[in-house]
């Protein structure tokens, strides 16, 4: 059984930083590409960042480019999201997700097979 568990969320002031972690079990982690998504109250879930299995390629939403960094450690079955210069509009529940490599756009929620339960990030202005 596959499990993805996020951690590292919390309350931070605008301009601050947080590092989210997601640890996977029950799958061959290095063969999956990983994504981070977020969902604010009353809104849809949106793509934030993606990283390939070998960490060669990363992709970011325009809204977080230059502020967020996705990385992974296959030895630890973990993916991370370093979030700097946080803004109030970054407030959301953040989810990690895993998918097998495909040609489907990485922004497509439906292309991800496994999801974590989410971790709350709240940025106070």
Image: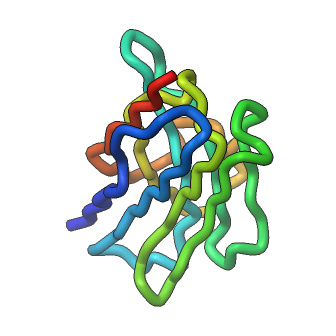
Judge by depth and name the residue closer to the eye, 23 or 64.
64
Residue 47 showing in the rendered view: no
The quarter in which the N terminus is drawn is bottom left
Image coordinates for residue 8, horizontal then vertical, percent: 36, 56
Q: Residue at x 43, y 29 (%)?
A: 92
Q: Residue at x 54, y 50 (%)?
A: 17
| Residue 2 placement, left or right of 54 | left
What number of labels is visible?
A: 0
| Rendered view: 107 above or below 46 | below
| Rendered view: 95 above or below 78 | above
Residue situated furthest bottom in the rendering: 75
Judge by depth and name the residue closer to the eye, 10 or 92.
10
Q: Residue at x 72, y 51 (%)?
A: 103
Image coordinates for residue 31, horizontal then vertical, percent: 54, 76
Residue situated furthest left in the rendering: 1
Image coordinates for residue 43, horizontal then vertical, percent: 45, 14
């Amino acid at each position: 059984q596959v499990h993805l568990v996020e951690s590292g969320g919390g309350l931070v002031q605008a301009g601050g930083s947080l590092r989210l972690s997601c640890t996977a079990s029950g799958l061959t982690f290095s063969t999956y590409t990983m994504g981070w998504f977020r969902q604010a109250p009353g809104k849809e879930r949106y793509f934030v960042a993606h990283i390939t299995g070998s960490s060669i390629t990363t992709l970011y939403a325009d809204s977080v480019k230059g502020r967020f960094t996705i990385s992974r450690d296959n030895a630890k079955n973990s993916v991370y999201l370093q979030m700097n210069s946080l803004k109030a509009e970054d407030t959301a529940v953040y989810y990690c997700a895993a998918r097998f490599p495909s040609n489907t756009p990485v922004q497509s929620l439906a292309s991800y097979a496994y999801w974590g339960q989410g971790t709350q990030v709240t940025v106070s202005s």
